[in-house]
Amino acid sequence: MRSETWVIAAAVLLVVVLGATDTFGRIKLVTLPRRESIDVRLDRDNYTLCEEERTLTLQQGRNKVDFSWANTYIDMGSIQFRVISAPGKVNVLSVSYPPGENALVWTVSSEKAGPAKIRISYLMSNFNRYYAYRAVADREEKKLTLRCFLRMQNSTGERFIGANIYPKVGDMYERSLDNGEAKLILAKKLSEVSFDKIYEFDANRRKETEMRYVLKNDRQHNLGLFTLPSGKVRIYQDDGHGGVAFLGEDWGATTATGEEMKLFLGLAKDVVVKRALMDTKDENKRGPIRDVRQDMRFTLENFKKQEVMLRILEHPNGQWEISDKKLKIQIGEDTDPNKKEEEISWDDHVEIEKKDVNNVIFHVKLPPTTKEKKYILYYTIHFKNLW
């Protein structure tokens, strides 16, 4: 027999009035009370929480609710029976599991006879969901529209007909999803999302500068309503002619409120960083222990027409501190023997962020440069107590 709730070889929900003794026979009925609603909640990654409501007719005294299923991915230990409304006081006295069967039996006491609305909840696996995004930036690359899509695939063995589906992102949807069926829905559209386009240089990754969109998941940037789930992000830009141009795609990591989602766009040809170790010296030797001083030099070039935000990532290790910070403008080409350097304000252009003991970020506001004019960033790092 096939029920509304489970794809079942033999499914029964039986209410039997007990006499003076506790002994009874398990009787299976052909008909089941009609399911009135079912909620499917997708806020867990590995399981799906299902909650359904039905109306049973309870007799006064003890009742046996006999429940069995087959061919569905239900976690038996998660099944719960709750009474929503009843003509009198109702208590669940016990639950038992017949050996060798996908079944359980609730013993329920009812103060009065009459209809009782009950809720049965359980966890199911094999209800797969995947999130994906479409981000369309404006022509100036200041704001974008972010659409979050949810792809659902029902492989639970269950038929969800007229279900209320609660995704991790967005509002509730009423949908039918048969066993084996897949559907794609727009879970949430977020407009006027402000973001930063940054250029990132990390010598540990590559010699070129990377381009990224950075989305801060907070209210100030018109996000921050929920954690953004991980998923593939396709990135487009308004082409100024009524269409969009494809910029690239990246995998967006799970991004909690207050955190950043960084989306890789490609390598920048017009923002160039050259890293050089100028000098290394041992200092303050104490037997096998010593301090080490390193003088670093970064040549920064920006051939775009506007200022860009550049992040330089460095990865020191252990105990360290930075000193002798300088930012200079080099006038003249590298091959010019008469080239000169003029120091400018560090604080107006550079901010240092110490992430942890192994990571530091230099945030640089880099104006446009030419072949005859470029920026040079200097700093000294002291490593303490090296063996």
Image (spheres, rainbow, N blue to C red):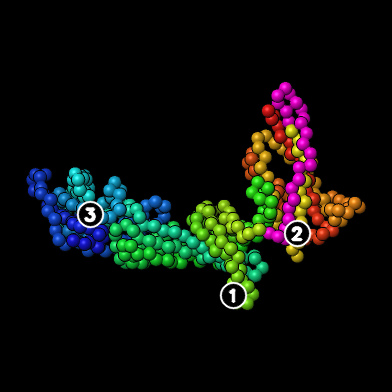
Residue at the disc numbered 3: 69
x 17%, y 58%: residue: 57
Q: Nearer the viewer, residue 386 or 143?
A: 386
Give SS at disc 1. Answer: loop
Asked whether disc 2 touches disc 1, contact meaning CB atoms under 8 Å apart, the reply is no
Q: Which residue is mark 2?
A: 302
What residue type is disc 3 on? Trp
Judge depth for marks 3 and 2 and give the one in front: 2
* Quadrant in which the C terminus appears: top right
**What residue occupies the far front of the structure in this picture?**
335
Residue 362 position (above or below residue 190): above
Residue drawn at 76 percent across, 27 percent down? 284
Residue type, label 2: Asn
Name the kind of residue labelled 1 in the image.
Answer: Gly
Quadrant of the rendered structure where residue 243 is?
Answer: bottom right
Residue 127: percent from left, percent from top:
36, 57
- The disc at residue 295 is none
237 vs 88: above or below: below
Give the magenta part as a residue range: 268-291
Is 309 on the left-hand or right-hand side of 112?
right
Q: Nearer the viewer, residue 245 or 28?
A: 245
Sequence-first disc among 2 and 1: 1
Q: Earlier in the sequence, mark 3 or mark 1?
A: 3
Dominant SS of magenta comes to strand
Q: Which mark is residue 243?
A: 1
